[in-house]
Amino acid sequence: MVNQRTFRITAATLLPCLALLAGCRALMMPLVVFGAEPTRKVAAEYPYLADKTICIAVWLDNNTRFEYPHAQLELSEHVAAALQPHIDNVAFVPNKRVVAYQRSHPNWDREDPAVLGARFRADRLMLIEVTQYTTREPDSPHLYRGRIAASVKVYDTEYENAAPVYRTRVEVAYPPKSVGEWGADDRSIRRGAMELFAAELARKFYDHRVKVE
């Protein structure tokens, strides 16, 4: 009699615990099954900016500069901000100084890039030649989508009249996975596009991880 009662009490106690344990395992299943998304390491294409002072010079055509008079400064500021946390002991020539020089010297882009960078006592000159800077789709003027494309060259300022030590091209569209946005404002689209461009460019200069497709 005592044994049967003990068995009933034990069973009544254990069954809820087992059910709770099963529920916990069920809740944990998605974490085990899905887990963190797999990634792979991507090495920097040019890992030589550490301990260097960088001068960023942005070139824009006249029409773009007229429509967006602060774009040179804004883009260079975004690029510097994207690089700073990932490059050890990197320093930047104040972008306002560079833009002020560009405005007071309209033919700055005809100078030897190494000489231009040396004017600011920089170790490297990063020349960003923007070929596209738009905020709307050409066939849909009310559909906002930022696009920035540029050729980027890095020069060692110790070597005048020399070829760039690194070159690449970066093209982005914002929003990245959308045909565009209705009713968005030009300012937010430009900011998003510049942040995306700067992030894409910065990753060329430091090791990082990307999702495995």
Image (cartoon, rainbow, N blue to C red):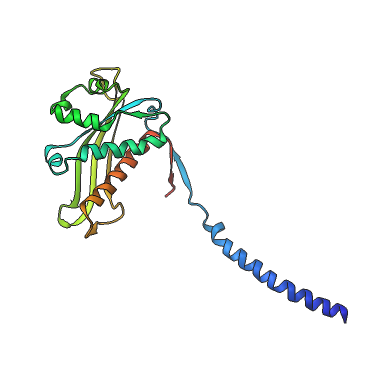
Percent position of residue 11, x then y: 76, 75
Residue at the image point whose x is 18% and y is 29% from the top: 102
Residue at the image point whose x is 56% and y is 57% from the top: 32
Left or right: residue 125 versus residue 67 is: right
In the displayed image of the protein, which residue is found farthest to the bottom? 1
Left or right: residue 201 versus residue 36 is: left
Q: Quick check: 149 above or below 116? A: below
Q: Quadrant of residue 169?
A: top left
Depth check, front residue: 202 or 39: 202
Depth check, front residue: 40 or 54: 54
Percent position of residue 173, x then y: 27, 48
Count of number-bearing discs: 0
Depth check, front residue: 204 or 191: 191
Residue at the image point whose x is 66% and y is 66% from the top: 21
- For the N terminus, give its image quadrant: bottom right
Percent position of residue 198, x then y: 31, 40
Q: Quadrant of residue 119?
A: top left
Percent position of residue 62, x then y: 12, 37
